[in-house]
Amino acid sequence: MSERVVELEVLRYNPETDLEPHFQRYSVSCREEWVVLDALNHIKENIDPTLSYRWSCHMAVCGSCGMMINREPRLACKSFLRDYQGVIRVEPLAHFPVERDLVTVIDDFVAKLKRVKPYLIPKEPKALEDGEYRQTPAQLKRYKQFTLCINCMLCYAACPEYGLIPKFIGPAAISLAHRYNQDSRDGGRDERQQEVAAYEGVWECAFVGACSEVCPEHVDPAAALQQVKIKSTIDWYLEHTMPWLTKS
Amino acid sequence: METVQTDVAIIGAGGAGLRAAIALAEADPKLRIALISKVYPMRSHTCAAEGGAAGVIKADDSLDHHFNDTVGGGDWLCDQDAVDYLVQEAPRELIQLEHWGCPWSREADGSVAVRPFGGMKKQRTWFAADKSGFHILHTLFQTSLQFPSIERFDEYYATELLVDDGRCQGLTAIEMRSGQMRQIRARAVIIAGGGAGRMFPFTTNGAIKTGDGMALAYRAGVPLKDMEFVQYHPTGLPSTGTLLTEACRGEGGVLLNKNGRRFLQDYGMGPETPLGKPVLKTMELGPRDRVSQAFWHEQQKGNMVATQWGDAMLLDMRHLGEKKINERLPLVRDMSISYMGVDPVRDPVPVRPVVHYMMGGIHTDIRAATPVAGLFAAGECACVSINGANRLGSNSLTELLVFGRRAALSAAEYLASGAGPGNDAALEAGAKAAQERVRELFQRTGGTESLAGLRKEMMHTLEKNAGIYRSGEGLTEACAKLAELRRRYKQIELHDKTNVYNTDLLQALELGSMLDCAEAVAVSALERKESRGAHQRLDHTERDDQRYLRHSLAHYQGETAPRVDYLDVVITKSQPGVRDYSGGHE
């Protein structure tokens, strides 16, 4: 089986000893089918046990191993070495504080996710004894795509607005709010709108579309955000032109 | 050392831990709940489960069918009262998830869809395409965000339980971000720490599945039950071990040897069923242990396909067609193309058995309670036991829901029974000692062993001697080797002396957990001189109900090997019989 030597340039930062981050070069003998994560694991196991990064599933579903690979937000477990030539530069996800090496601080996202109330607020409460809500495949399809978010935060690293205005709630959190808004069982849109339709909510989005380009699960957050904008605009016009149609 | 006071501490925030947390929050909003996990909840390995969760919902099915499939599938090593509880509670739990928004796949009329699964006589596996575990985990995680009483401790690694006066009263944990040790005092503790598949080199399990929860309980005096039963899932990608769900076969995929023969018919699972028309509980819908064992026999005969990653069989899904594969198995297609370069729409995918699940684990009773007062366990880390000697696919997601909730209810009952305040000085001393043990590892110099080296030796030992087929000779070798590795573990030295997010330290602690679990696997396997379910002995080829219709209990003995004793299986209505997966079983 074929092997080749790959040069990786990895950002290192130890907050206890380093004033500034720096790059460290590693030469790794890699198998042809490896992904960048395999190369990092090889380094950790055989060359440098101090290298720090997050990973777990190695199948693009746990969302742990998001990082910048040649300046592009990627999952390391789904970035094949065969798709790269020359030195591969590996850095922590952009727009997040660096905790250490490739590990970022994600408190901001975790807090924002909670704010948008990403859980079902039932339109009509139902007892468990009464069985499941009926939901046709067509109704499922209206929101299914937006359920696929693995919270990997590549979209935040790609979003120029989030880079400029950190208060922006951002693509993943708004997509997940939209996911519940679109669910036929849900009646919580009004509650979510307070966060989602606020100034730091959907209106910060300039529709660059970078979020959808980097999303490894094809959630298409940009589509979610534009749908939220259209609905919020309709709300505004209804409220101002036909106030008798809107609640309180 | 900073101390956190809480009512219930939950270690592990995957499916079982989250389910327990929500159940506690709902049971009593005044309870303080600490949800402690070494990873953010959405990173937990529940996310990797693909196929679905079993629960009786359709008119042609019954709780008795689910019970019988599970007990027979487990080769009668299941506790039947626990299985009864599982099958009764399963539909309620799955409907509960539906009410919380889980995007279950649907029938045209809007009711929940079910799919066939291995060893199940009826279609009863609820699914969300082939990302069922992912959706269950995220539904639970997102639902949990509405409860202010759940306080999360994300990226905290639990190092020891605090047990005094025979009662579990908290734990010590390292905050990864700072490297600081915290003492979390709790009136009850629930362990939901997942399995230990990373003891083996070739596994579907993510990096985090290192048996930490099992080791915590084991070292605190709770026996590990039935640890010799390790499930090989028949269909992993040979390159990475990535799981291709059993639903591939549930939807009609077939297994071929290198001659194109559906070889399962030669191993008691025939006669061959028509292509594209899977028949429940036979051929490709046989149970995982039997299918993996059939692979082993075909491999011995030289009937497997050679790949650069070793021998493989072929999983042929071409006849399902592109539309069905995209709709029902999108992840399978994506991963086969990404990691193997094979598109299942066009070509059969090479697969081979891969370590997937621990049937054994922390000994609990049907209430999810361990023998230590105030300590409960649920999910893969626990052994209650509903899986017996072989778990049926799609029972584990159900198990973590049913027994995650059960552990919470039992913990709440325990609190209500009024366990008095603990001995503060004794707990403080326990926490200090725990901190000292980590400090000693962290600061150790002059160590002669490497973490990566010991880990490799452990994996190699288990793969060689504790795989699909085992022998007394091989297991004796494994026991000796693991005892040696546990001794040498005391000589490892860390290279990373940083406090912040020290994964060198984390991995060293995880290796310690895995070595303890691995020794329990090998010793229990050596002691069980019979073949049952996933435990197959070349030197004891028959099931021996006279001697071994019993659970093994491995008791931690510190530096020496565990002591193994046995506990009778609970049998209520199904006497041990023949596991028949031939087409004539009806």
Image: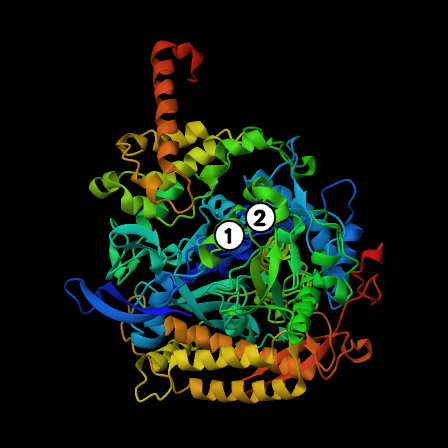
At mark 2, the secondary structure is helix
Disc number placed over residue B31 in the picture, else none: 1
Chain assignment, label 2? B
Front residue of B415/A126: it is: A126
Residue B429, percent from left and from top: 42, 77
Disc number placed over residue B27 in the picture, else none: 2
Front residue of A35/B357: it is: A35
Residue B340, percent from left and from top: 48, 58
The residue depicted at 36 percent of the width and 56 percent of the height is A79
The residue depicted at 24 percent of the width and 38 percent of the height is A161
Disc number placed over residue B240 in the picture, else none: none
Residue B155, percent from left and from top: 39, 61
Q: Are marks 2 and 1 on the same chain?
A: yes
Residue A7, percent from left and from top: 25, 66
| Residue B413 appears in view | no
Front residue of A146/B43: it is: A146
The residue depicted at 72 percent of the width and 65 percent of the height is B74
Callout 2 touching callout 1 (CB < 8 Å): yes
Residue B320 vertical placement versus A134 (above, below): below
Q: Is residue A39 left or right of residue B519?
A: left
Chain assignment, label 1? B
Q: Is residue B209 left or right of residue A36?
A: right
At mark 1, the secondary structure is loop
Amino acid at the residue labelled 2 = Ala
Q: For the residues marked 2 and 1, what is the alpha-carbon distance in whole angstroms?
A: 9 Å
